[in-house]
Amino acid sequence: MDRKELKEYILNTFGVTPDTPFEGSPTHEVFRHSANKKWFGLILDVKREKLGLCGEGFIDVVNLKCDKLMIGSVKMNKGVFSGYHMNKSSWISVALDGTADNELIKTLVGMSYELTMPKIKKRKASNDLEVAILRVREMEKHFDDLKKAVETGDKTLEESLRKILTDYYENGLWLSDYERDEKGEFPQNLKRGVLSQDGLYNQLQT
């Protein structure tokens, strides 16, 4: 997904067009809620080196607000970085050069939109079904990668994945997702081994 495609998606989905509030920076485009004027997205061009990327020149990214409990996991996806010139504990930057998965970008835009909504309408992102599905997919990937890291002896990756999965298991989100699964709220084709009652716990004990 590139800049133009993202702008079209946001217009068609949320009915929002960007403004350019930064004098002298017409390429910096802000998407806001009409009610509270809060940003839920900022498209800008950034030097590749600022994101730790190889090569010279600039790359378009979109800054999005992210659930703090998911931010570590989300940043493990290709094309996702710590928020550029934003609070890195709650914002991410996503590349608009085809690196990041299109469906992931759409889901992250939706999450940012909800997290910045006026409080009277705001729903907690961790209770939203779409966000929960994304979370299970992410944790399932980490669950599989942890098994591989243990098998291959990659201690650095193993330690990182154990921390993410332990936080998920202990902070109440695993239980929330497990209860959703028990109620049949998740799609049938969703891979969900990480929600096994004993599977994750046993893996974290190895």
Image (cartoon, helix red, strand yellow):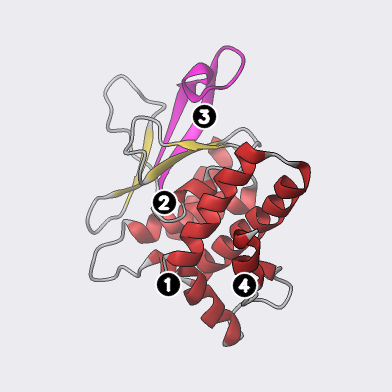
Q: From the top left corner, tell me how far across and down residue 192 is, in percent.
A: 67, 70
User: Nearest the camera: 111 or 36?
Assistant: 111
- Disc 4 packing (10 Å; few <14; some 14–19; many ≥20): many
Q: Which residue is mark 4?
A: 195
Please state which amino acid type lies under the numbered disc 2: Cys
Residue 10 drawn above or below residue 84:
below
Q: From the top left corner, tell me how far across and down residue 111 is, in percent.
A: 44, 58
Residue 60 — which label?
A: 3
Disc nearer the start of the sequence (2/4): 2
Q: From the top left corner, tell me how far across and down residue 104 is, in percent.
A: 59, 52
Q: Which residue is mark 1?
A: 127
- Disc 3 packing (10 Å; few <14; some 14–19; many ≥20): some
Find numbered disc 4 in the image and state the secondary structure of the residue it sits on: helix
Please state which amino acid type lies under the numbered disc 3: Asp
User: Nearest the camera: 148 or 155?
Assistant: 155
**Could one spot residue 88 in this view of the protein?**
yes
Magenta stretch: includes residue 57: yes
